[in-house]
Image (cartoon, coloured by chain):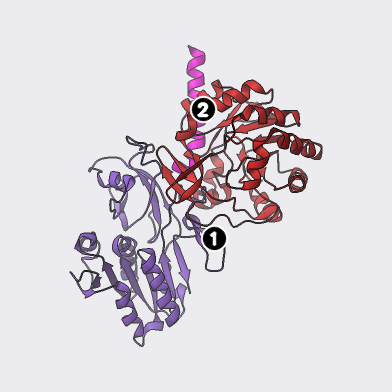
Chain colours: A red, B purple
Amino acid sequence: MPDFCGIELEHSVINASGTFDAIAARRVYGDALLDDFPFSAFVSKTITPEPRVGNEPQRIWETPAGMINSIGLPNKGLEGFLAEDLPQLAELPVPLVVSVMGTSVEEFSRLVERVGGRDEVTAIELNVSCPNVHSGLIVGERPAETLALLEALRPLTQKPLIVKLTPNVADPAAVAIAAEEGGADAVSLINTVKASGGPVTGGLSGPAVRPIAIAQVRAVSAAVGVPTVGMGGISSGADAREFIAAGATLVAVGTESFRDPRAGQRVARELAVLDLNSRSR
Amino acid sequence: LIDEEGLEPQPGQFYMLATERHWEQRGGRPFLPRALSVADAGDAPGGTRLDFLIEGIGPGTDRLCELEVGEGVWVNGPLGNAFSPPRDLSPAAAGAILVGGGIGIAPLAGLRRRFAAANVPTRVLLGFRDQAHSGGLDDLFSCCEVRLASEDGHAGHKGYVTDLLATMLEGDDAASAAVYACGPPAMLDAVQALCAERGVACELAMESPMACGYGACFGCAVPKPDGGYMRLCVDGPVVRYA
């Protein structure tokens, strides 16, 4: 059983933030979802201090082996999340990671204090890399900004802080080193890659970005001592294995869940079979 | 197609379909499954029979149209909400008017059958651009009386199906009906405007680009009547205007 920042997980496959709405999925598929939950930990969609309605449609565009999205972080805001969503997410059979994004150190601080103060929450992911929101780009693009943010947030909670890295920089390892120096417990990567297609300008995801993700996971894992969560176009256990070989401690499934609601447990199962086969050889 | 383990869908619900889970062809598309309203369904040996009306307009629908008898299909569904009985839309509504445009006639076929079984008086108005775009009409609506409109005049009224609806809603009994519509966005806008003008409740089955179909991607957002957006996959695809 993998150990991630002191959290024991059933397997090494979690979800990428914003690619699986456990509350909506339970409405659609019922409690069967909980009996065979796809992920060993659940990462929430990013929440912001105030509610957001999200971007004006059209929001998605299919590309060769992937898709571009420009969703715009629709969410109920911090208070709405704590009151309405958190009690439902607490019913999931796995540890909960809450993703947060603020536009300033003050906003991030409020989010981390309030979310970190809840027992239902196991860890916090800091979204400093969402390419759809201008402020996110700025912090995650600059090692100094990332370091300053982490130094401000680190004293506010004992819970693991995971920094989600953007791929839209020349040297993601430099940002990862800054996050580690500031006290981050882990880094997760990659977020979506800046792209345009049809009427949509936003972030590219899916197998199209997998080679980029593997290169960045390898570079970051070699540069930092904290664990990494690798993601980017993982569709199978074999894909997950490539990320783990590149240095990832955990892997996350994102876009593949859109095609297959049970992608998480399938990837985990395929990965377990591959591990077993390699061990018996 | 035959769904070996699925539930029977309600009229208005949809499925995500792909020829297989990973159905990328040369060039990497189609990548995502395609959302398609079920036209009709019923019991069949070995499971639930699902009927779809599909027009090939891109790599996904083209591939689905190439399916041969006996091939497997990757299916996720039934998803989304369903059309409601007229009385749920308006206490005064005793009957139903179904308005379909083009490929949008599909979900109305199962709805018409459901209403017929429940003895709900139902009138059907269907419109097509031209003969080439009237596919499915004979298969899905051969059994019943249908009023037709066509933009090129090849069948029925020359003009829009909404012309037929406008005439029908001018009758004295307009308020005793509920309207159910599926078709292109401009047609749905016109139906909604006509119904609002006449105080008639309506339900519209809408469409939006959709990656997942079960609330995960937030891609299928459409404006809500009262502001903000809703996910058409979990809060629709049937949207009520009463």
Residue B137, picture quadrant = bottom left
Q: Residues within 10 Å of mark 1 (few under 14, many from 20)?
A: some
Residue A265 percent location from the top left of the image: 51, 34
Is A224 part of what is drawn in magenta? no
Does residue A146 sit above or below A72 in this rendering?
above
Residue A264 percent location from the top left of the image: 51, 36
Does residue A204 sit above or below B149 in this rendering?
above
Q: Are marks 1 and 2 on the same chain?
A: no
Which of the two residues, A10 or A190, is positioned nearer the viewer here?
A190
Which of the two residues, A82 or B121, is positioned nearer the viewer here?
A82
> At x 41% / y 67%, what residue is drawn?
B204
Q: Specify the subunit that label 1 lies on.
A: B
| Residue B229 numbered mark, or none | 1
Residue A22 percent location from the top left of the image: 57, 46
Kindly report which numbered mark, 1 or 2, lies closer to the viewer in this rendering: 1
Is A275 part of what is drawn in magenta? yes
- Secondary structure of the residue carrying tag 1 is strand
| Residue A240 numbered mark, or none | 2
The part of the chain drawn in magenta is A257-281
